[in-house]
Image (tube, rainbow, N blue to C red):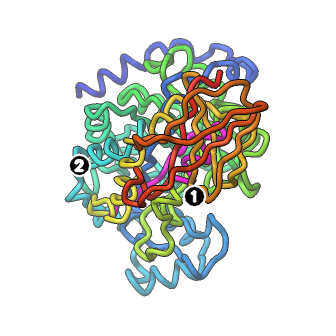
């Protein structure tokens, strides 16, 4: 009852101004990205829901990126995908409906404090949880989905409330993923899409914001309708001007079929794709974020093997490459239906956190360094506080040559106290890597040379 009263009071300003003219995309796009997100660089994505019960998607049998997503299980059944239907019928039977997974989504071992402690140790600065994926199942007691959520079914827990509180206790920012579509909702169709937006989508987003104060809203499922149909400008106008998170919230670019890499807040890639186009390309000068799983899926897929997971070294390379190109990395983990994070995912996060403890100053609050050139192919450059950072994901076998510097001060390797040999002549800096016992190296994953006073 208390939450309902709070929600009604929070929504009154929005309802009173519902007829206000939405801002144009040009006006909305001028809003600066809040500095906290720009400085954070590394976040954790969490895909968790009913799809975590079957935890199935083909891995070796298909080639495409999207075909390996376990969180798309329901859609594959609706579309009668043979691999999915064969697995489903064999494992659960032909009469077992997707909705029946709700009774098996128990989350009995979900411990938000343990999760949040792991995220803090990983070095991540923000966490984004799927509030509702495309199947429509909500991880809170949504008034728009009163019989299809984790409070009245399954675990009988307000998962968003529990996790958001724990995450914030650990000093991390908290955000929410929200799907603009629902595969099986009766209003989500061409003939009733305006009702879907007015009666379901917008009120539900308003409810989420008012109850949980997310500092990130990761919209998704934007491809079926344009932003005018989805009334995205109306929603963002409220979010930026009237909502309780108007000064701190960050949004992405998934607000209509035409908005990717064009409108909204930061731009997005997933598994290095924008729809079916590879890479961020020349859009990297705008704030952007790469998201992907440690394996081949966002949602937990129990059929992935070790070889399907990125190693810690590959993850550090991904982080360094992304940040050096002006982006953030939102790395996904998929807990199982019991609420446990797979051990291999925990290990990868802890390994990243150990590396960031020594080398984080090359990542957090940094900016890309695009002025010059480094001779080493597997080297990525950032800058911060007058210093240049050269992140080497392979140990340099010969001296590094850096051009494009007007000046260069002392050179150090982070985590190593020995002297680094250098010369600076004709605006070229040459760094000679130290000859040391491998046991003396600060890391086995990647190494950072800091060049002081370069600007």
Residue that appears at 63% across and 65% down: 65
Q: Of 54 and 278, which appears nearest the observer?
A: 278
Q: Do callouts 2 and 1 mark residues in contact (Cβ within 8 Å)?
A: no
Q: Which residues are magenta?
A: 316-336
Q: Is residue 193 left or right of residue 412?
A: right
| Quarter placement of the N terminus | top left
> Mark number for residue 121?
none
| Figure quadrant of residue 28 | top right
Task: Compare marks 2 and 1 and give the one earlier in the sequence.
Answer: 2
Q: Position of residue 353 (x, y in %)?
A: 37, 47
- Vertical order, 39 against 94 (above or below): above
Q: On the rendered structure, is 188 left or right of 131?
A: right
Q: Secondary structure at mark 1?
A: loop
What is the distance, in whole Å, between disc 2 and disc 1 at their CAs?
A: 33 Å
Q: Work out whether residue 155 or residue 144 is closer to the camera in this orientation and state it.
A: 155
Rendering coords of residue 332 (x, y %) = 46, 53
Whether residue 231 appears in this view of the structure is no
Outermost residue on the bottom side: it is 90
The residue where tag 2 is placed is: 114
**At 74% across and 33% down in the image, what residue appears?**
425
- Give residue 394's mark: 1
Q: Position of residue 168 (x, y in %)?
A: 30, 32
Quarter that holds the C terminus: top right
Q: As rendered, which of 199 and 82 lies closer to the eye?
A: 82
Residue 287 among magenta residues: no
On the question of residue 222 being in view, the answer is yes
- Is 20 placed above or below 381 here? above
């Amino acid at each position: 009852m208390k939450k309902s009263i709070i929600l009604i009071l929070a929504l009154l300003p929005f309802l009173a101004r519902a007829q206000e003219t939405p801002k144009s995309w040009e006006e909305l796009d001028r809003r600066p990205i809040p500095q906290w997100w720009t400085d954070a660089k590394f976040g954790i994505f969490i895909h968790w829901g009913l799809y975590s019960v079957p935890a199935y998607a083909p891995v070796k049998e298909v080639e495409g990126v999207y075909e390996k997503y376990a969180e798309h299980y329901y859609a594959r059944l609706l579309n009668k995908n043979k691999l999915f239907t064969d697995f489903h019928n064999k494992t659960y039977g032909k009469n077992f409906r997707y909705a029946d997974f709700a009774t098996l989504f128990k989350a009995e071992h979900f411990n938000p404090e343990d999760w949040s402690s792991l995220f803090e140790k990983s070095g991540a600065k923000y966490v984004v949880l799927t509030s509702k994926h495309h199947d429509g199942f909500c991880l809170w007691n949504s008034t728009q989905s009163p019989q299809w959520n984790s409070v009245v079914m399954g675990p009988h827990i307000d998962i968003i409330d529990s996790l958001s509180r724990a995450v914030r206790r650990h000093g991390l920012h908290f955000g929410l993923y929200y799907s603009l579509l629902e595969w099986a909702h009766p209003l989500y169709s061409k003939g009733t899409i305006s009702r879907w937006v007015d009666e379901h989508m917008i009120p539900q987003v308003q409810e989420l914001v008012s109850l949980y104060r997310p500092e990130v809203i990761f919209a998704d499922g934007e491809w079926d309708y344009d932003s005018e149909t989805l009334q995205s400008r109306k929603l963002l106008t409220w979010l930026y001007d009237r909502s309780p998170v108007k000064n701190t919230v960050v949004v992405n670019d998934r607000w209509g079929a035409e908005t990717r890499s064009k409108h909204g807040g930061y731009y997005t890639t997933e598994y290095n794709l924008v729809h079916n186009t590879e890479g961020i390309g020349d859009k990297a000068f705008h704030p952007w974020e790469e998201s992907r799983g440690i394996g081949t899926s966002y949602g937990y897929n129990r059929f992935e093997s070790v070889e399907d997971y990125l190693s810690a070294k590959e993850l550090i390379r991904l982080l360094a490459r992304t940040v050096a190109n002006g982006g953030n990395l939102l790395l996904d983990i998929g807990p199982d239906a019991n609420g446990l994070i797979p051990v291999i995912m925990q290990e990868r996060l802890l390994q990243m956190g150990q590396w960031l403890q020594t080398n984080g100053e090359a990542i957090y609050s940094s900016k890309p360094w695009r002025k010059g050139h480094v001779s080493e192919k597997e080297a990525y450059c950032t800058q911060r506080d007058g210093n240049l950072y050269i992140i080497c994901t392979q140990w340099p076998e010969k001296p590094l040559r850096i051009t494009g510097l007007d000046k260069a001060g002392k050179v150090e390797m982070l985590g190593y106290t020995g002297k680094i040999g250098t010369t600076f002549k004709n605006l070229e800096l040459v760094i000679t890597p130290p000859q040391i016992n491998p046991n003396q190296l600060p890391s086995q994953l990647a190494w950072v040379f800091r060049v002081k006073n370069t600007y």
